[in-house]
Image (cartoon, helix red, strand yellow):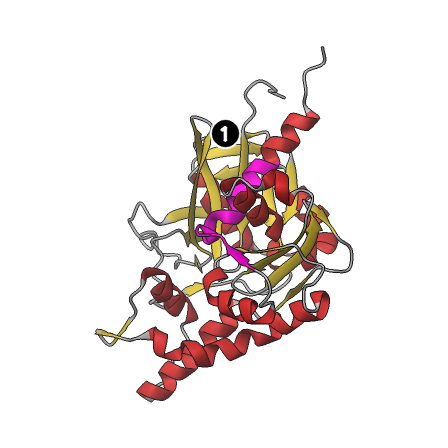
Amino acid sequence: MNNINPVIRAVDVGYGNTKFIRNIVNGRAEADHFPSIVNRPSVNKNSFQESPDIYQVVVNGNRYEVGPGIDAALEGGVRIMHENYIETEDYMALMYGALTQMDVDVIDLLVVGLPVDLMSSKRSLLEKRLVGSHRVGNRDVQIKKVNAVAQPLGGFLHYASQAKLLEELSSTRNLLIDPGFFTVDFLVSTGLREISGKSGSHPTGMSAYLKAVAKGISEDLSINYDNISHIDEGIRKGRFRLYGQDVDLAKYHQAALTEIMPAVDAISNKVGDGRSIDQIILVGGGARIFLDPIKKLLPKHHVHCDEHSVLANVLGFQKIGEAWYARNHREVA
């Protein structure tokens, strides 16, 4: 194993977005992401779309398209939203899509993320599945070692590093909240050490909010509309259109917030009024949507919200990987 210049990368295949470290330039990680939408093209030889933003991958002989160029407004793309998602071909298609964008053939250490509630049951399975050689496009990528990490820890480490609070937060009791597409993960820690019994996941993430927005649109336009991927894209881009007309998604915000309150209640059941919590850090793709409900739940705290919430986890995973590798591969004097 090359200890001098090890190749360390991070990928977080979330229910909403797949985030990855594309490259390391002058010691800085370059991160990117695309929606976790998988398109299965027909068997027609010409069915692959010609676009640099659509990544063509093959898993177990089956062809898939992933990437930022997959149009969420069109039919055909699907999301994987169940607890066994890491065992699916769709998961591997998203993982391979991320690997196609890394200009490396050997990865000494790959750090990946898992929801908090899946760490005990799925961690070993995922790590074993990803170790080895993978055919990605027209090349083979060898992954030598895989570490799976609870998703909120990545966002916490990134925020602490960016805010120059790493030393301070390493000794405080922190509540880390990561609202993803399907689950809201939360974890109480002292530094990076999880405090037993105070963590969990709740299946009321951004998808519940988006379904409520879709319901409002359906009622207003007298149609049956359920393309939550398109709504999610509209929120991220700041513009949503149907029938060639702009639709103001903000009008559905307050009603949709009620749908995510079960997740907020689940956090309340674990931490109460938060009197023993020193810091609250909110990260993840749904961080901005969840900010006001968390502030109302814990009004005596200042809630830190990572401005780069979508990429926070994977950037933190990269730091975790680099620190782990350095600690475990020190040169013997």
Specify few, some or many for label 1: CA neighbours under 10 Å numbering under 14, 14-19, or 20 or more: some
Residue 303 covered by magenta stretch? yes
- Identify the residue shown where x is 74% and y is 55%: 121
- On the image, the x and y values in percent for residue 238 come to 31, 64
Please tell me whether residue 58 is drawn above or below residue 297 in the rendered image.
above
Q: Which portion, as a residue range, is magenta?
A: 302-320
Is 65 left or right of 332, judged from the image as shown?
left
- Identify the residue shown where x is 60% and y is 65%: 300
Q: Can residue 255 be seen?
A: yes
Is 143 left or right of 173, judged from the image as shown?
left
Please tell me whether residue 114 is drawn above or below residue 79 in the rendered image.
above
Q: What residue did someone put label 1 on? A: 105
Quarter where residue 200 is shown: bottom right
Furthest residue to the top?
333
| Element class at badge 1 | loop
- On the image, the x and y values in percent for residue 281 come to 57, 55
Quarter where residue 179 is shown: bottom right
Please tell me whether residue 253 is drawn above or below residue 155 in the rendered image.
below
Q: Amino acid at mark 1?
A: Asp
Q: Can residue 11 be seen?
A: no
Furthest residue to the right?
196
- Identify the residue shown where x is 33% and y is 89%: 222
Residue 259 covered by magenta stretch? no
Residue nearest the viewer, comparing 93 with 15: 15
- Identify the residue shown where x is 37% and y is 65%: 235
